[in-house]
Structures are given as C-alpha cells and as structure tokens.
Image (cartoon, grey):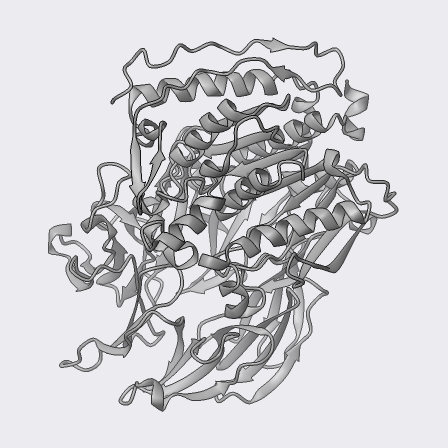
C-alpha cells in the first residue's frame, strides 16, 4: 500500500504554555499525523510490522511533505526559546579564531590549511619555500553559493606537479574528482564523477588509482552497488577506458583501497567486507611481469603497509596481537609464516607511522597518547616528550623529510601545531590558536567506574573549577562505543559554551571502541552489544551517584553508532536522563544492512537475517522496535539530514514517527532535519546552528537558564 498525496492530515502544532517563564518548557500538544501502511516482514516465523516503510523512499513528495511538517513543528518549538539566539551568537564568537592545520611539502611548495575564524571551510594555502609569498591554492568557500559543497580530499603526484581534489555536494559521501596542473591550477581533463569511499593514489604523473561503486538509483542495495572496485585512470582518457585493477561482482568486497609505497615500487590493495578485517595484496610495479600477489586472503585481522626498504616490507597488524604490532617480511616470501616482529605487541594499543628514516609508535595508554621513536629496524631512539596529557597526531612524513609537524590537543587545550626535528627529537611550538576562554578556569578528571558486569570503564569529566557537587549541574554525557573507534581527549570550541555556563561534560570510553585494542572492541559487538549500552547507563548512574548531576539535569548524546547508543539507552532506561539527543542514528537494526553502506557494519552488529538467536538479540535493543506504548520518554531532539547517504535519514524518520506516537509523557519529542547536509554538518555555519539548537533544547527542557544568558533576557 502506497501512501497517497493526501496521506497526512497535517495538523500543525499548537504550542500550549506561555513563554513568559523561560525556565518552564513548552508542551507540544499535537504532532503531524504520520500515515501508516500495511507492511510486515517475517523473521524466523515472527511477524514484524513496519508501518512507516514508505519513509525509506526519501525522494518522494509524501516524505518531503512529512519532513516539512516535522521541521515546522520543531523550529516552531525552538523559536520560542528566549536565549537560543544568544547561544548561537556566543558559539560564533567562540569559533571565531584563526585555525591552522599541519604544513606538508609537495614539490617546491609548502601547503597548509587555514580558517580565518568563521569561514565555512578551511582554505588550502601554499608558499614556495619557508620565505615564499603565501597564496590560495584551493578555497572551498567559493565552490558553491550556499557553502554546502566541501573539499573532500586532495592528492598530489610525487613530484608535486599534479593534483586531484575531491568535492562533496550537500554533505554526500559521493564525490567528484577534479584533476589539475598543480603549478598553475589549470584543469587537465573533465571532472570524474560518482566516486565513493576512496582516496586517490598517483602513479607518476600520468595517472592514479581510485575506488568506487556502481551508483544506485536509491538507497536500496544490489549485488553490483555493494561491490567496491579499484581502477587505474590515465589522465586525459575517458572514464570508460579506466583499467579495473581489483574487484568483481561475484566476490564483492564492500571496501577496496589502493595505494603505493613512497618509492612507487609497490601497489598495495586492501579489501574488506566490513569495517574490521582486511585482505592484503601487493604488486611489484618495477617488474614488467609482476602481478598482484596475495599476502593475506582472509578478513580476520587488520593489516596496513607502512613502508618499504627495497623488497623489505613493514606492516602494522593485529594478527596474533590484539593491541597491534609492526612486522617485516620480504616481498619474495610474503606468507605470514615468514613475518618477523619489528615492534612487538605491548599492553597498550599501537598506531604506527613512518617519517624520515624512522618508525613512530603512537601508544594509547588509558586513552592518553604516548609516542616512541624507533629506527626502521625497530631499535628505540627515544620517548618523545609531549606538551602534556592529551592526544597527539600527525607523526608521519615522507622519507626525504628531516622535520614533521604534529598536533596536540586536550579538552581544554586548543589544537596546537608543533614542529619536530627527527634527528634531535626537539619539538618547537609552531602555532597555538587564541581562543576566547581561560583554560585555567577548568579541570579534567579521569575516573574508572564499574559497569553492570563489573568491568572498569574509563571516563573523562570536565567542568569549571570549584563547582558544587549538589546534583544540579547540567551534564552532557557523550559517547560512541563501536567500530574500534577511540574517543580521545580533544578540544571543541563549541563545548566551551556548555562548560562556561556551569555545565559538566563527560566522555566515557565504552566497550566496542578501540581504546584497549581488539579485545575491547569485540566485547561490544554482535551478541555482546548490550555491554555498550550497559557501560553508558553505568556512566550516567555514576555521575548521578557522585552528585555531579541528577536525572533531571542529565543529557545523553551521540551520533551515528552513537545515535544508536542513545536510542537504545533511552528505550531501555527512559528514566535515566531528562534529555536525549540521538544524531544520525542507526535506529532500525532489523533493516540497517539493506541500505547504502549498512551491509559493511555487520562485523560489529550482526544482522537479523543471520540466525533466530541473532534476530531476537538485535530486535530486543533496536531503538525503533524497543519503543513501548504508554511510556514517558525523555525530552528528545532527533537530528538527521536529507543528504545522509551513510546512515539514511529513514532511520531517524521512522524512529521519530513511532516515538511521537508512543510517548505518553509531557516531554517533547522532535526531529530536526537539516537540508543540504549529510552524515555530519556540511559546513561550519550549519554545525553552529545545529549545536545551538541542541544546547537550547537541552537547557530549556531542564528548566535551566544559562547564567551567561540571563543578562540578555
């Protein structure tokens, strides 16, 4: 049954309650009526109704009408919050400072990214040598009138004479590649369109490797649209003549990547069927008869080629080393039985890179960075002294370089750039931004709390010095918990607004992440996914028991897999938090693998089609299916975007419609649907607007007027 154009008797919201008392939340008395269709799926003999299936076809007029109606409700509510405009104004001020990226050398030029303050996108500048005049190389702010087209990556040929840069329109994962002469920026050929999840790896100056899928007509998957393939494109030739290097429809890999060693001798191909574990293939391009050989032909572990010395290959792997190690092998004998340790596994998680003639080992020690420098044979050169406790990144450079640039940041330490002399080990401050706040006013603690099964979970807690632990501090609890992703300490200018108004920010490192290696990751996957939700719930309970906050002043937040986290938590424990903020979440866990990128997430989630046991397990926590009638849910602001082709917006649409139907309490449940944005805001101005709305909604529903806003009311 298809919903007709008159599917909705849209009853625009009547907002009851006066706005004369800014600490008393509005009550939403009516929502748009969402049409239902008779759609039922059967899993292992169990029938599951899916009345909002029509929302999955998000290009129809019916869905457009529903989106418009929901946005009118949502923004009608938000517009009545008296200090919302002041929040946005302060966020703009906090973000309005010069931001600089780490410089890198290509050919005769030094390139660097810079944002003057409130530019929607960083501009790529360059100068010829240290003393050369600075000029703009690429300005993404000029790519579109509305600022929703962004730069999605730049790749230079080895000698720096040619460049390929990718652009994304409206926040989509699909990109276009523009090929230019890097010296005069003149285009070399027509734009290459319909590229997805791909870097660009130049081979000499005449061509490059890239990966893509066959573009689907909608969000539904087919065998061809799931098969990622690696091609070689020769500059100046039509796309139809691109050479297929790896991939086919009979043995589809969802993610295929191609790269070259710095000397361009070896082609490296990685292939995977999910977000964890990859096959590894290599080809000696210096050998006229060389073919692509198999190094690893299973998906059980992660393997990343770091560098080579002639035929000696250095690889980072977690094969028999859940915390990762660096190994070596000779290209003539690539089998894993011939691999030898260069940097053995330790109790801390390793992320390795190379620069100059060195290996750099970035260790995560209780979610904080420690870096060691080795020679290419694995001999320790030195422990690198960092500016403090926090997160460092960027310890990588080309073999010919003598210096590299790395970044360092923490919750109250704005991201700063340091120049590192690889021979002496000396770090020199290169750039430190000036932000409108005093870091000495704040403190950061790391605590370890017990989850439901007794596992100790680390959590960072940030707040103003001297706050009173009286249970009344508005607290923002943010987490992710999946896909081997680590949440490290990092600076956010927008977060300062929350902190300077007396708020507490808490970031736990849940199982499912990568903070303690592959064992920690696996402890939050498939039939262990409930551990992640238990860890998050326990974090909230810890903050309440320690009097940082209480149920009435707690907000839970997360995006993507973190949106699933919030959705599962609010359905399992609707009493835990006052406010729930699920962003671009995976809410329909029974059908997630049927859309766009979803099938690649099965390593973490499993699928409802795998077995009856897996179906029952997933259904129990799937946010869409865990909602219950006559339940009072937290004040909820769901956020998504019309161009999200990673976690399709139908997840949020269906969850919002069902939640509005089933919520029996007085708290509002709204959905904010951004336009010309994707899986994350497409530019800075949209990011500021979204954050302002989330902060305003949160404080308003807690009955709190932010102290810094009182004077303006």
Q: Residue at x 40, y 42 (%)?
A: 647
Q: Most extreme residue toward the left, as rendered? A: 241
Judge from the rendering whether residue 243 lies leftward or rightward of residue 70; answer left or right.
left
Q: Could you tell me if residue 395 is visible in this image?
A: no
Q: Could you tell me if residue 367 is visible in this image?
A: yes
Relative to 314, is 502 above or below? above
Judge from the rendering whether residue 445 lies leftward or rightward of residue 265; answer left or right.
right
Relative to 31, is 226 above or below? below
How many badges with numbers are in the image?
0
Question: Residue 374 appears at what percent x and percent y?
Answer: 55, 83
Q: Which quadrant holds the C terminus?
A: top right
Question: Residue 71 appears at what percent x and percent y?
Answer: 48, 20
Of residue 134 and residue 285, the one placed in the foreground of this image is 285
Question: Residue 369 appears at what percent x and percent y?
Answer: 63, 67
Q: Residue at x 25, y 62 (%)?
A: 209
Question: Residue 643 appears at what percent x and percent y?
Answer: 38, 35
Judge from the rendering whether residue 564 lies leftward or rightward of residue 292; answer left or right.
right
Q: Residue at x 37, y 19 (%)?
A: 35
Of residue 4 and residue 574, the one placed in the foreground of this image is 574
């Amino acid at each position: 049954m298809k919903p007709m154009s008159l599917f909705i008797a849209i009853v625009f919201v009547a907002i009851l309650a006066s706005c004369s008392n800014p600490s008393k939340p509005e009550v939403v008395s009516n929502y748009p009526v969402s049409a239902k269709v008779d759609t039922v799926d059967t899993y292992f003999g169990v029938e599951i109704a899916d009345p909002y299936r029509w929302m999955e076809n998000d290009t129809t007029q019916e869905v457009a009408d529903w989106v418009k109606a929901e946005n009118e409700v949502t923004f009608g509510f938000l517009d009545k919050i008296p200090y919302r405009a002041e929040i946005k104004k302060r966020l703009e001020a906090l973000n309005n400072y010069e931001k600089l990226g780490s410089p890198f050398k290509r050919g005769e030029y030094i390139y660097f990214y810079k944002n003057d303050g409130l530019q929607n996108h960083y501009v790529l500048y360059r100068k010829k040598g240290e003393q050369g005049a600075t000029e703009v190389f690429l300005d993404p702010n000029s790519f579109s009138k509305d600022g929703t087209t962004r730069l999605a990556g730049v790749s230079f040929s080895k000698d720096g004479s040619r460049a390929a840069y990718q652009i994304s329109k409206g926040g989509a994962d699909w990109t276009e590649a523009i090929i230019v002469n890097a010296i005069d920026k003149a285009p070399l050929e027509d734009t290459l369109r319909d590229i997805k999840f791909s870097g660009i790896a130049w081979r000499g100056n005449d061509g490059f490797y890239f990966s893509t899928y066959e573009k689907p007509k909608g969000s539904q998957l087919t065998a061809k649209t799931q098969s990622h393939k690696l091609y070689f494109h020769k500059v100046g030739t039509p796309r139809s003549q691109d050479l297929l290097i790896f991939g086919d429809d009979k043995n589809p890999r969802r993610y295929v990547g191609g790269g070259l060693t710095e000397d361009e001798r070896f082609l490296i191909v990685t292939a995977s069927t999910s977000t964890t574990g990859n096959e590894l293939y290599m080809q000696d391009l210096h050998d006229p008869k060389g073919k692509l050989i198999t190094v690893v032909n299973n998906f059980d572990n992660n393997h990343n080629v770091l560098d080579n010395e002639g035929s000696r290959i250095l690889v980072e792997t977690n094969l028999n080393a859940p915390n990762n190690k660096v190994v070596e092998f000779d290209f003539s004998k690539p089998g894993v039985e011939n691999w030898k340790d260069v940097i053995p596994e330790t109790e801390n998680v390793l992320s390795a890179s190379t620069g100059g003639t060195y290996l750099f080992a970035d260790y995560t020690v209780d979610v904080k960075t420690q870096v060691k420098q080795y020679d290419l044979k694995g001999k320790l050169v030195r422990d690198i002294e960092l500016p403090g406790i926090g997160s460092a990144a960027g310890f990588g450079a080309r073999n010919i370089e003598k210096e590299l640039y790395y970044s360092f940041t923490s919750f109250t330490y704005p991201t700063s750039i340091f120049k590192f002399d690889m021979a002496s080990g000396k770090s020199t401050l290169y750039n430190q931004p000036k932000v409108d706040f005093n870091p000495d006013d704040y403190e950061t603690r790391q605590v370890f709390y017990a989850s439901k099964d007794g596992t100790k979970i680390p959590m960072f807690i940030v707040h103003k010095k001297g706050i009173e632990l009286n249970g009344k501090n508005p607290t923002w609890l943010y987490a992710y918990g999946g896909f081997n992703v680590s949440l490290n300490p990092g600076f956010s200018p927008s977060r300062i607004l929350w902190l300077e108004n007396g708020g507490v920010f808490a970031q736990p490192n849940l199982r499912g992440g990568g903070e303690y290696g592959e064992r920690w990751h696996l402890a939050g996957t498939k039939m262990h996914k409930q551990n992640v939700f238990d860890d998050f719930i326990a974090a909230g309970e810890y903050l309440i028991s320690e009097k940082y906050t209480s149920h009435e002043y707690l907000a839970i937040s997360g995006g993507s897999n973190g949106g699933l986290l919030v959705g599962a938590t609010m359905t399992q424990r609707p009493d835990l938090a006052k406010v729930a903020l699920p962003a671009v979440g995976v809410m329909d866990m029974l059908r997630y693998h049927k859309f766009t990128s979803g099938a690649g997430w099965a390593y973490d989630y499993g699928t409802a089609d795998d077995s009856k046991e897996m179906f029952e397990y997933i259904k129990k926590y799937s946010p869409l299916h865990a909602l219950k009638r006559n339940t009072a849910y937290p004040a909820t602001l769901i956020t998504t975007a019309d161009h999200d082709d990673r976690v399709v917006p139908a997840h949020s649409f269906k969850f919002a419609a069902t939640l509005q139907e089933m919520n029996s309490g007085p708290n509002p449940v709204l959905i904010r649907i951004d336009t010309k944005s994707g899986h994350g805001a497409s530019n800075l101005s949209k990011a500021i607007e979204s954050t302002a709305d989330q902060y305003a909604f949160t404080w308003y529903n807690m009955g709190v007027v932010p102290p810094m806003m009182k004077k303006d009311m």
